[in-house]
Image: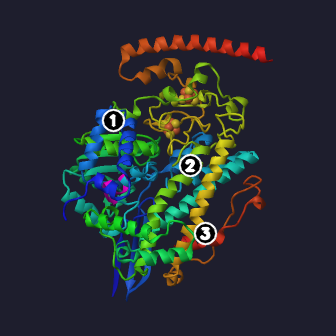
């Protein structure tokens, strides 16, 4: 007996997605996915000034803001044979990295985690045990028993209010959730911390591109001028600010995100063998140091973590 | 047990002090241009009100408004956006998918009929229902159903307020903003692509506090945030008045941070709070980072000529005549008078400043 299951909308993504799965004897034998929204941005772009194209293209997605704009300015530069100055490459690389960091963390905690983390189960956790666990995998300072019991109390109050908001009608208690309550509590605490964290690293975009989401780009370079003797331009204060934002962001990634990712993934190893489609992944490389056209100057590093992260 | 905790109780429970709370109310009040009595009202309302259910629809959009919303800087604002309102349906953040997600939508529509706030991100395609469907229903059907029992509608961003990029020529999907397809409900257009996080939070808090729609301009935007042109609040304005312009993105004037008018700046006919509140907790805003304003809080900004062509090159958009008239909006007769006055003072001031600059140049040279 085969059965068709429709999941529409798929939530915690950007855009609109519908998935239909055919099930036979408890196994998915075929599946179909469709994007259910169209805007026609390609059609709208036709005949426009190519210098404007990045802004239209950027609006493809506001979650992975920036990257479509970057692809667009590179495309126009490639078509017109423009090489950007080395500093512009560096600034674009920094903006790209800020996006790369922010997007991975938000994707993991706020978009994907609720498929692996049972929020309600975290109420059963022993905060002391969560604290011991947290301290065993990371030196992140916010890891005392008191900290985790505060988070638990907050969730408790939230659940008791009867207004479950974004957590309403979740699949809580389903046996596909494999994490022990202590790991669930750890993840919920970091879900909340990551929500605070993500609005800091994007300030790199605000400094170079004036705003986030949707910072500004420019065909031929970057709009922000560098002038160490000027208050109105990228000066030592602004650059130090960027450095500090990256330092803090890295701490969070190394001490919270990566340890959590590994800890949670260890309970779901079997998922690595399900689906996946083709097993070859191609990486074009990025972060050029001699213009995007010079393939050799692009870095390929990060391929492994990209793979892991796309799995989860 | 059934008594819902008030916002103030929740804020306290989250470890914020009463002082934090009052400071927060003050900040929000100042952002909205309120007198002390207004701030007192915010304090009172947040101390006594429970969470308002919210349905947040995603139609033809890119989710930048949701992303901007979660960038609100004040820690209590973050609490507000997550759990001072009850975000019962939002495809971006909700745990449930498919039937369960639809259930949340319908539960709220039934249980809180007439009480919930409807927030809409995205436009509505009118050419063909198939251009945007969720759960097998068209964007229009979903919006229409959800609007029926809504207390008020917030149209987030340029998409829901004016159609944004998908409504740019030739608008292949017939994208329309909320106010063009829904009638008979109060609609607040919170403009921008996306709107500034603090502006979004400010509008929500205004609704929570005063339980009524803030004052709106002729285009349905809250006056508190959209009554001034970017040009009138821009810190580069003295350069404009002095006739000091960037002529190319890599010239010396760009490095000095001169006015971006000749690079296509739309500040002179764009109403937004970028120059005042700035972006991402006041870090910068487009002009401060060297890029001209592209006018993202105005209807049709995508079709208002190439971004890097300056306004004067457009027939009818000479900055000192039409922009000021457009700027003053409806007060046409007095508006022209004021504009004329502004022109002469500007020109006089510019000559004076330029003389001054020449003098100091010759002194230093
Ligand atoms: S034209 Fe633009 S850069 Fe110049 S003063 Fe006006 S808003 Fe500022
Ligand atoms: S400066 Fe202009 S284009 Fe930029 S965000 Fe503000 S209103 Fe939009």
Residue B352 pos. (x, y %): 62, 11
Residue A77 vertical position relative to residue B219 in the rendered view, above or below: below
- Give residue A127's quadrant in the image: bottom left
Q: Which residue is mark 2?
A: A203
Residue B186 pos. (x, y %): 25, 41
Mark 2 vs mark 3: tell me if same chain. yes
Q: Is mark 1 within 8 Å of ligand 2?
A: no
Apparent side of residue B32 relative to residue B314 in the rendered image (left or right): left
Q: Is mark 2 within 8 Å of ligand 2?
A: no
Give neighbour class at mark 3: few <14, some 14-19, many 20+ (Cα, 10 Å): some
Apparent side of residue B285 relative to residue A222 in the rendered image (left or right): left
Residue at 35%, 61% (x, y): give it: B134
Residue A34 vertical position relative to residue A86 in the rendered view, above or below: below
Residue A102 vertical position relative to residue A254 in the rendered view, above or below: above
Q: Which residue is mark 3?
A: A306
Give neighbour class at mark 1: few <14, some 14-19, many 20+ (Cα, 10 Å): some
Q: Quadrant of the C terminus of chain B?
A: top right
- Give residue A201's quadrant in the image: bottom right
Apparent side of residue A286 relative to residue B28 in the rendered image (left or right): right
Q: What's the CA distance linking mark 1 and mark 2?
A: 30 Å
Q: Nearer the viewer, mark 2 or mark 3?
A: 2
Residue B220: numbered disc: 1
Q: What's the CA distance linking mark 2 and mark 3?
A: 23 Å
Residue B52 pos. (x, y %): 26, 53
Which residue is farthest right? Answer: B365
Q: Which residues are magenta?
A: B80-89
Q: Nearer the viewer, mark 1 or mark 2?
A: 2
Residue at 34%, 33% (x, y): give it: B34
Is residue B88 located in the magenta-colored stretch of the structure?
Answer: yes
């Amino acid at each position: 007996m085969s059965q068709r299951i429709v999941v529409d909308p798929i939530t915690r993504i950007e855009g609109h997605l519908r998935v239909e799965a055919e099930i036979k004897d408890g196994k998915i034998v075929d599946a179909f996915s469709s994007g259910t929204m169209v805007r026609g941005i390609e059609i709208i772009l036709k005949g426009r000034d190519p210098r404007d194209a990045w802004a239209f293209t950027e609006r493809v997605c506001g979650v992975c803001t920036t990257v479509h704009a970057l692809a667009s300015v590179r495309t126009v530069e490639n078509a017109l044979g423009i090489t950007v100055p080395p500093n512009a490459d560096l600034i674009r690389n920094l903006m790209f990295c800020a996006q790369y960091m922010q997007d991975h963390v938000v994707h993991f905690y706020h978009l994907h985690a609720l498929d692996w983390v049972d929020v309600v189960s975290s109420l059963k956790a022993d905060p002391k045990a969560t604290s011991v666990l947290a301290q065993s995998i990371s030196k992140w300072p916010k890891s005392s028993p008191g900290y985790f019991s505060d988070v638990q109390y907050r969730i408790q109050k939230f659940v008791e209010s009867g207004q479950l908001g974004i957590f309403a009608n979740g699949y809580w208690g389903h046996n596909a959730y494999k994490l022990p309550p202590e790991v669930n509590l750890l993840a919920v605490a970091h879900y909340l911390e990551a929500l605070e964290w993500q609005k800091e690293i994007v300030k790199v975009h605000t400094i170079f591109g004036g705003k986030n989401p949707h910072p500004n780009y420019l065909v031929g370079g970057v709009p922000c001028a560098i002038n160490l003797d000027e208050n109105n331009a990228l000066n030592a204060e602004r650059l130090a600010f960027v450095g500090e934002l990256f330092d803090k962001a890295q701490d969070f990634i190394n001490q919270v995100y990566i340890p959590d990712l590994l800890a949670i993934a260890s309970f779901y190893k079997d998922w690595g063998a399900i689906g996946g489609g083709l097993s070859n992944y191609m990486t074009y490389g990025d972060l050029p140091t001699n213009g995007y056209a010079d393939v050799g100057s692009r870095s390929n590093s990060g391929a492994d973590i990209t793979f892991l992260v796309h799995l989860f | 047990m059934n008594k819902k905790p008030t916002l103030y109780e929740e804020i306290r429970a989250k470890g914020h002090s009463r002082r934090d709370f009052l400071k927060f109310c003050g900040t929000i009040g100042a952002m909205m241009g309120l007198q002390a009595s207004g701030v007192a009202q915010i304090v009172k309302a947040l101390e006594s009100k429970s969470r308002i259910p919210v349905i947040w629809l995603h139609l033809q959009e890119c989710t930048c408004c949701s992303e901007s919303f979660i960038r609100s800087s004040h820690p209590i604002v973050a609490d507000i956006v997550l759990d001072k309102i009850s975000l019962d349906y939002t495809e971006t953040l909700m745990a449930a998918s498919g039937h369960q997600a639809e259930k949340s939508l319908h539960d709220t529509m039934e249980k809180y009929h007439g009480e919930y706030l409807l927030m809409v991100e995205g436009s509505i395609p009118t050419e063909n229902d198939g251009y945007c469907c969720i759960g097998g229903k068209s964007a229009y059907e979903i919006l229409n159903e959800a609007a029926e029992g809504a207390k008020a509608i917030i149209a987030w961003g340029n998409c829901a307020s004016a159609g944004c990029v998908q409504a740019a020529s030739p608008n292949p999907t017939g994208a329309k903003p909320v106010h063009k397809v829904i009638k008979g409900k109060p609609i607040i257009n919170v403009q921008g692509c996306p709107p500034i996080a603090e502006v979004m939070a400010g509008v929500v808090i205004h609704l929570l506090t005063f339980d009524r729609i803030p004052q709106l301009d002729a285009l349905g935007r809250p006056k508190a945030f959209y009554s001034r042109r970017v040009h009138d609040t821009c810190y580069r304005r003295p350069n404009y008045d002095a006739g000091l312009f960037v002529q190319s993105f890599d010239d010396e004037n760009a490095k000095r941070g001169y006015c971006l008018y000749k690079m296509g700046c739309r500040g002179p006919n764009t109403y937004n709070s970028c120059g005042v509140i700035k972006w991402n907790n006041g870090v910068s805003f487009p002009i401060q980072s060297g890029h001209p304003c592209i006018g993202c809080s105005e209807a049709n900004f995508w079709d208002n000529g190439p971004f890097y062509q300056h306004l004067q090159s457009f027939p009818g958009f000479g900055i000192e005549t039409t922009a000021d008239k457009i700027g003053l909006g409806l007060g046409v007769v007095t508006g022209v008078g004021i504009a004329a006055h502004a022109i002469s003072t500007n020109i006089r001031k510019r000559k004076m400043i330029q003389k001054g600059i020449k003098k100091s140049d010759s002194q230093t040279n």
